[in-house]
Image: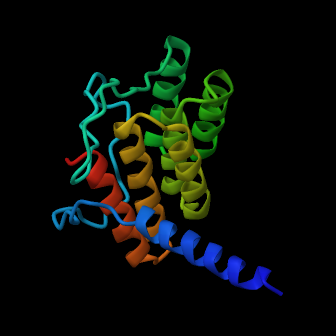
Amino acid sequence: MPARPAVAVLVSAVAALTACATQGPAPPNPARGPSAAQPSPFAEPGVPPPATTGPGERPSTAPAKQFHLGPATTALVAQAQRQAGSGDYGPAAATLERAVRIEPDNPLVWIELGRVHLSEGNAGQADALGRKALALATGDPAAQALAWRLIADALRARGRDTDAYDADRRATSLAPH
């Protein structure tokens, strides 16, 4: 049975890499309160993404990616924000689902949909949508930070304060506010 030691070494290596990958370089932002009411990711268009290098890393020579909404999606998001602002969360979610069909690979739409679900009290769905947005936000630190903030707020709403703290820390390391 010589395979068992090799499996144990592999499991140990994966565990060590996972532990390293989950540690963020920046300290938490104590000024950030537990409020689940985050501004929309569309409130400040044109904000350039921040640098994302950690300690000892070289800055990337490639420009960071930045997601934007197309005109049709922008109109749908604005409509959904009006609906959600009036407390019409069901219609707002339906409007954003139309936007998702137009731009399914745009994390900003998924984040906005997650915010609507969080506002209507569905923190589990908001968390899942934040994680979907995070997976799509590769290369865009600002979008990644927005996704982590949605995840943090959803975790906090579910009483998972320690996990929310970690998610906030990751968001701050990507895009300090």
Residue extending farthest right: 1
Question: In the image, is residue 37 above or below residue 157?
Answer: above
Residue most extreme to the bottom: 1
For residue 17, side relative to residue 35 (left or right): right
Q: Nearer the viewer, residue 98 or 166?
A: 166
Residue 156 horizontal/vertical position (percent): 42, 70
Residue 98 is left or right of residue 176, and the answer is: right
Whether residue 83 is visible here, answered yes or no, is no
Q: Position of residue 177 (x, y in %)?
A: 19, 47
Question: What residue is at 49 percent from the left and 12 percent from the top?
Answer: 71
Q: Can residue 89 be seen here?
A: yes
State the colouring used for the structure image: rainbow
Among the 4 quarters of the image, the one containing residue 127: bottom right
Name the residue furthest top: 71
Rendered image quadrant of residue 47: top left
The residue drawn where x is 32% and y is 43% is 39
**Depth order, front residue of 23/40:** 23
Q: So how many labels did they put on this image? A: 0
- Which quarter of the figure has residue 124? bottom right
Q: Residue at x 51, y 67 (%)?
A: 18
Q: Nearer the viewer, residue 135 or 18?
A: 18
Farthest-out residue, left: 31
Q: Residue 169, position in %: x, y?
A: 30, 62
Say which residue appears at 31% left-offset and 32% top-offset: 60
- Quarter of the image where the N terminus is located: bottom right
